[in-house]
Image: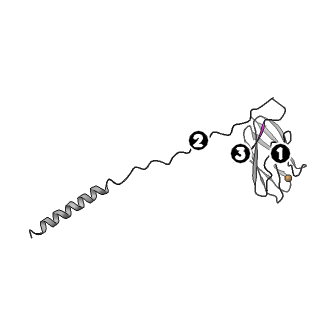
Amino acid sequence: MSRLLPVLAMTVALVLSACAGGGTTGTATAGPPEPAASGPASAPAASDGGAGTGVCAPSTEAGAVEATMTGNAFSPGTIEAKVGDVITWTNGDGVPHTATYKDDPTCTTERLGQGDSGGLTFSAPGTYAFFCQVHPDMTGTIEVTS
Ligand SMILES: [Cu+2]
C-alpha cells in the first residue's frame, strides 16, 4: 500500500496547480469604445430677416416630419414643422421628383428616384412654398413654427 502514496501526492499537486493556473488567465474586458460624438451640422445663420434666403438647408438626416411624393403630388400638400425639423420626402412615383424651396431654388433635395428620400430644414418660423423642379406645377407649403 505504501507505494501508492507518492502517486497520490503527485496527483493532488497537479490538480492544485492546474486550478491555480486556470484562475489567472481571464482578462478584464473593457467596454466598447465610445464613438466620437460628432456635433450637429452647422446650421446656416438666419440672415437678414425676411428675404427668404439662408433659412433653408437641405438635409439627408432622418426626418422629424415625413411626407411623400405620390401621383405627381406632394402629400400632405401643407406640412407643419418646427424650426430645425428635417422634413423628409420619399418618392413613391416612378418618375423623379425634387422638393425645392421656391424663394431659393438652390435649397433643394436631390433629384429623387423611386423609393429615394431627401429632406429640407428651416431655421426660422414662416410659411415656405416649395415645388418640384421636374414638375413645376407640383407645389406645396411648409408652415414652420418655433
Ligand atoms: Cu416631380
The reply to whether the magenta stretch includes residue 2 is: no
Packing grade of label 3 (10 A; few <14, some 14-19, many >=20) is some
Please state the extent of the stretch shown in magenta in the rendering. 31-60
Q: How is the image coloured?
A: one colour
Q: CA distance from mark 1 to mark 3?
A: 18 Å
Image quarter in which the N terminus is found = bottom left
Mark found first going from the N terminus, 1 or 3: 3
Residue hosting label 2: 37
Dominant SS in magenta:
loop
Q: Secondary structure at mark 3?
A: loop
Q: Secondary structure at mark 2?
A: loop
Q: Which mark is residue 100?
A: 1
Q: CA distance from mark 2 to mark 3?
A: 21 Å
Of the residues shown, which amino acid type is indicated by label 1? Thr
Residue hosting label 3: 64
Instruction: Identify whether 146 is placed above or below 28.
Output: above
Q: CA distance from mark 2 to mark 1?
A: 31 Å
Mark found first going from the N terminus, 2 or 1: 2
Q: Residue at x 18, y 63 (%)?
A: 10
Q: Residue at x 78, y 42 (%)?
A: 80
Do the residues under discs 2 and 1 have CB atoms within 8 angstroms?
no
